[in-house]
Amino acid sequence: MSIKSRADLMALKEVGRIVRLALVEMANRLRVGISTGELADIGGKIMRENGARSAPKLVYGFPGEVLISLNDEAVHGIPSHSRKISAGDLVKLDVTFEKDGYMADAAITVPVEPVSEDARRLVACAEQAFQMAMKFARANHRVNEIGRVIERVVRQNGFRVIRELGGHGIGHTIHEAPSIPNFDDASARQRLTSGLVLTVEPIIATGSARTMEAGDGWTVKTADGSLSAHYEHTLVITNDEPLLLTAA
């Protein structure tokens, strides 16, 4: 969507605030031995207390309120009270909420120490790629400029972009136009416009850039079992620095 009024912007800021609250609290409560289901309950409690709803459940019928993926799972992991967090895990917390007809989406990857140096570098690289992409997430730049810089940063660090997964427009539903590839896609040459709401989300791996779907029908994993990391925020395009709706 593109913001048409102050009411649009205020509503997006509100749902972005709730997404941020849930992510921060889930990350703060993350520890060895907690289950992914318990983490999801923490996020869900904040969601309900603030009058929001789970967008993946609302739009796609996802069997959970938030998405939690571990290690080689790139995205869309289903929380479970029987799945416990272990030392060395890379935990991807992915939260998309809806409130009053507006949606916001954000994700972080939290390493559960002790983790390998490669794992630590992978997590830092995903955030670095996002931050570098912000220089191009501005009005009149082309969509593929975002992906170009993301992939360049990722390759320079010795990792790979998972090309099948990327960012997207968002606002009144989860996935809106345009798609925001994490690589220099020659077909993604449309110009960004002021007021456009979208996500930028590097999703990267230590090994294969290919994915496979797990047996649960939702979780997407790296094809070779290599570690993955995910970093995402919802933002509004402006003529200058983008406005991050889900970041502190």
Image (cartoon, rainbow, N blue to C red):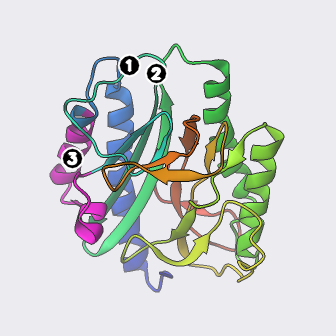
Circle count = 3
What is the three-letter code of the residue carrying label 2?
Val
The span shown in magenta is 39-65
Tell me the CA gap for discs 1 and 3.
Answer: 22 Å
Q: Is residue 188 magenta?
A: no
Q: What residue sits 25% from the left and 41% below the top? A: 40
Tell which of 152 and 21 is nearer to you.
152
Q: Residue 52 in the image: state x and y as whole percent.
A: 22, 60
Q: Nearer the viewer, residue 125 or 89?
A: 89
Q: CA distance from mark 2 to mark 1?
A: 7 Å
Q: Can you give x and y, in whole percent of width and height, for residue 164 in the image? A: 59, 61
* Residue placed most toward the observer, 192 or 173: 173
The residue beneath circle 3 is 44
- Residue at (46, 21) in percent of width and height: 112
Instruction: Tell me whether the residue at label 2 lies in contact with that at label 1, contact meaning CB atoms closer than 8 angstroms.
Output: yes
Q: Residue furthest top?
A: 114
Secondary structure under the numbered disc 3 in the rendered image: helix
x then y, percent, for residue 96: 36, 58
Q: Residue type at mark 3: give it.
A: Gly
Q: Please rate how many residues cluster around mark 3, counting C-alpha atoms within 10 Å: few if below 14, some from 14 to 19, many from 20.
A: many
Per the image, the residue denoted by label 1 is: 86
Q: Is residue 81 left or right of residue 131?
A: left
Q: Residues within 10 Å of mark 2 (few under 14, many from 20)?
A: some
Judged by depth in the image, the label closer to the viewer, 1 or 3, is 1
Q: Which secondary structure, mark 2?
A: loop
Q: Which secondary structure is most common in the magenta stretch? A: helix
Above or below, 134 relative to 120: below
* Sequence-earlier tag: 1 or 3: 3
What secondary structure is found at the residue carrying circle 1? loop
